[in-house]
């Protein structure tokens, strides 16, 4: 049963959600990432697979507007992320992207529910308690809603981080190494949860990892190599 | 964002509480000093209003001013009643008001004077009328409140200046209260005013227009020296046709130049100017106050540094959090605002607690130390300078927060996240 939100977003979306053109990045005279042309269509969850140093994090920082690429351009939801001024990038990121990091990046002074409320307030200017409760329930943390991040297990923390990333109803959910620190069973559960929640909220996944265990879940894969190897 | 600041402060509650306390102690010290010195000076100024010069017996000029203007010390002695007339005849003298001291009732001084004295001090009647005949008394607001005396109340004065135990009572000569004064916030609130002749009458001295009683000899007068009173107190006792001091108000500035020298050349008289003596006294006290003030400023700067160190350490640990906040949509301004509000909340709490503490200490001191109460120290009066102390505390909190916040914002978000990942 498709979520009505998914239908709305799909019908509004025109063209690719992420579009890279001639994209590469040079740092200290060394190419650290070279992707060239690449597109992510809405709903086609993508995996960015590659070893350390292949530029996964650099690509994610460029997609999310935290870094300006040295060559080429990138668009998100039809807007030229790499060409926008910093405030414009912040706004575009706020509107369209949710981020999940490998290590817990929840605010330790706030409860799980508080973290979600803050993210929602920052992105939309309002707090929807019912939506927060629904999302917390969806990631299976209803009983931990008032717990502080330091009281959560790693798996619980990761689930809370996913809920936090989705609470703004982003069209693109970017996850950097979401499963590397987890054992097989938990990694499988985590990626299952990401698919399930992304589909429920209408988000498209872009997961960067060197963790081959989850590769089979993605039909849409972009394999990255260490740039020097490409050049050679 | 304020909610987030509160959450962070609550998250390290002990650290927060200690910093608030440290700042509060600095603010409280400054507030106490400010209230104490300003209320003291204010009191000195108000009590001496309209009194340009005091003439009394030779001795310490400061003692003369303290005893006759502020009613806190024993007088230097007595001067002949003719001094009043002598002063009134001088050019440039607008008013010369005699005071006769020596007795008290329940540690409130009985002052023999003229209705011009309460008028000079700006005191007006709340009830009843001004004293007219001997043994009629008008009492100050605090005398009324503390003794419960009302109109028609009779009481007997005791020998002494109200500093400690009252001396022998003058049972045969009771006073009657005919008027109550409105509160003035000056020393007159604590005085019992009566005609100068009452003080003479209590001590068996006739008013000057009548001759001495045939029967009263010098020996009899000497016998009047009550047991337990000091020599100075006895001296202060108005002896026949004597007064303790004369308060003088000048009508022209020439008098201020000419009169003090003229008075001091008279064998038994000395003049003292309240403004001069008070500034001499305050200069002495002032050195001590300045030292304590410097210490309080140091305390406040220490508190500022402590907040600075606490926030610097906390923000260093929170670099990743702040980068994350930026990623999920917080603007630079919002991050600075959040950290600044943390510093400001600390400073506001410290300043508020400091004000409360400062006023509480003043109130407690006034309640438990009689002399401070008599000086009119009040916990409920605010001084405009307190606003500056609060502003300084807020500025310290803000600066202590902004420096680390700006440092953090200068770093690159992607780098910070990469390092924190």
Image: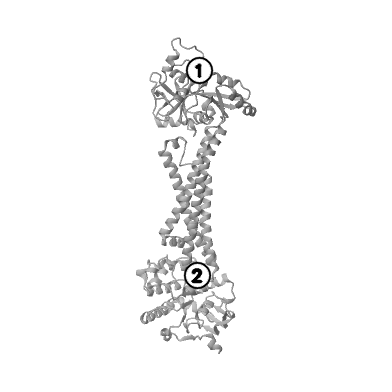
Residue A230, located in which quarter of the rendered image? Answer: bottom right
Q: Residue at x 38, y 75 (%)?
A: A155
Residue B120, located in which quarter of the rendered image? Answer: top right
Residue B92, position as x, y percentages in the image = 63, 25
Using the rendered image, report if marks 1 and 2 lie on a common chain. yes
Mark 1 Cα within 10 Å, few/some/many (few <14, many 20+)?
A: some
Residue B161 visible, this angle: yes
Q: Is residue B231 above or below residue B375?
A: above
Residue A32, position as x, y percentages in the image = 54, 82
Circle on res. B241: 1
Residue B331 visible, this angle: no
Residue B325, position as x, y percentages in the image = 49, 68
Residue that label 2 marks: B323
Chain on which label 2 sits: B
Q: Secondary structure at mark 1?
A: loop
* Distance in Å between CA atoms under marks 1 and 2: 89 Å
Chain on which label 1 sits: B
Q: Residue at x 55, y 68 (%)?
A: B410
Mark 2 Cα within 10 Å, few/some/many (few <14, many 20+)?
A: many
């Amino acid at each position: 049963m498709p979520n009505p939100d998914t239908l709305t977003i799909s019908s509004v979306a025109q063209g690719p959600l992420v579009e890279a053109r001639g994209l590469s990045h040079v740092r200290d005279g060394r190419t650290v990432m070279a992707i060239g042309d690449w597109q992510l269509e809405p709903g086609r969850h993508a995996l960015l697979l590659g070893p350390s140093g292949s530029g996964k994090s650099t690509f994610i920082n460029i997609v999310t507007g935290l870094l300006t690429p040295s060559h080429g351009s990138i668009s998100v939801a039809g807007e030229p992320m790499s060409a926008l001024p910093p405030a414009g990038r912040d706004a575009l990121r706020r509107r369209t992207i949710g981020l999940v990091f490998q290590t817990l990046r929840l605010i330790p002074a706030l409860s799980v529910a508080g973290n979600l409320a803050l993210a929602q307030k920052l992105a939309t200017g309002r707090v929807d308690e019912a939506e927060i409760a629904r999302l917390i329930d969806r990631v299976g943390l209803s009983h931990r809603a008032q717990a502080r991040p330091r009281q959560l297990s790693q798996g619980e923390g990761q689930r809370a981080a996913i809920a936090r990333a989705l609470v703004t109803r982003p069209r693109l959910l970017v996850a950097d190494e979401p499963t590397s620190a987890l054992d097989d069973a938990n990694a499988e559960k985590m990626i299952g949860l990401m698919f399930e929640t992304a589909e429920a909220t209408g988000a498209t996944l872009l997961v960067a990892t060197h963790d081959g265990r989850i590769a089979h879940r993605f039909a849409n894969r972009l394999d990255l190599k260490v740039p020097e190897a490409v050049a050679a | 964002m304020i909610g987030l600041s509160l959450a962070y402060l609550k998250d390290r509650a002990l650290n927060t509480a200690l910093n608030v306390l440290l700042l509060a102690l600095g603010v409280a010290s400054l507030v106490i000093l400010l209230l104490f010195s300003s209320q003291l000076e204010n009191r000195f100024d108000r009590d001496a209003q309209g009194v340009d010069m005091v003439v009394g017996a030779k001795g310490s000029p400061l003692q003369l001013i303290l005893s006759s203007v502020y009613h806190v010390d024993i007088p230097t002695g007595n001067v002949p009643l003719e001094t009043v007339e002598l002063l009134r005849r001088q050019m440039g003298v607008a008013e010369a008001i005699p005071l006769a001291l020596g007795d008290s009732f329940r540690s409130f001084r009985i002052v023999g004077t003229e209705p011009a004295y309460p008028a000079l001090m700006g005191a007006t009647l709340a009830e009843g009328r001004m004293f007219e005949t001997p043994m009629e008394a008008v009492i100050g607001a605090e005398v009324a409140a503390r003794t419960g005396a009302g109109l028609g109340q009779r009481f007997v004065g005791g020998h002494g200046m109200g500093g400690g135990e009252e001396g022998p009572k003058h049972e045969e000569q009771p006073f009657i209260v005919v008027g109550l004064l409105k509160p003035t916030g000056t020393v007159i609130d604590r005085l019992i005013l009566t005609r100068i002749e009452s003080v003479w009458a209590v001590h068996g001295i006739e008013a000057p227009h009548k001759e001495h009683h045939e029967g009263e000899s010098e020996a009899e007068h000497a016998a009047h020296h009550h047991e337990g009173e000091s020599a100075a107190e006895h001296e202060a006792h108005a002896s026949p046709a004597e007064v303790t001091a004369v308060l003088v108000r000048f009508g022209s500035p020439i008098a201020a130049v000419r009169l003090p020298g003229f008075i001091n050349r008279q064998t038994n008289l000395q003049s003292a100017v309240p403004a001069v003596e008070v500034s001499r006294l305050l200069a002495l006290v002032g050195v001590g106050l300045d030292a304590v003030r410097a210490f309080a400023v140091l305390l406040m700067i220490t508190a500022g540094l402590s907040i600075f160190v606490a926030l610097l350490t906390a923000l260093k640990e929170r670099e990743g959090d702040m980068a994350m906040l930026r990623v999920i949509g917080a603007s630079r301004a919002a991050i600075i605002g959040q950290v600044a509000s943390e510093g400001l909340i600390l400073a506001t709490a410290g300043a508020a607690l400091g004000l409360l503490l400062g006023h509480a200490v003043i109130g407690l001191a006034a309640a438990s130390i009689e002399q401070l109460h008599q000086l009119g120290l009040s916990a409920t009066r605010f001084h405009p300078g307190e606003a500056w102390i609060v502003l300084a505390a807020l500025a310290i909190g803000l600066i202590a927060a902004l420096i680390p916040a700006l440092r953090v914002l200068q770093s690159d978000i992607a780098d910070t996240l990469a390092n924190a990942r």
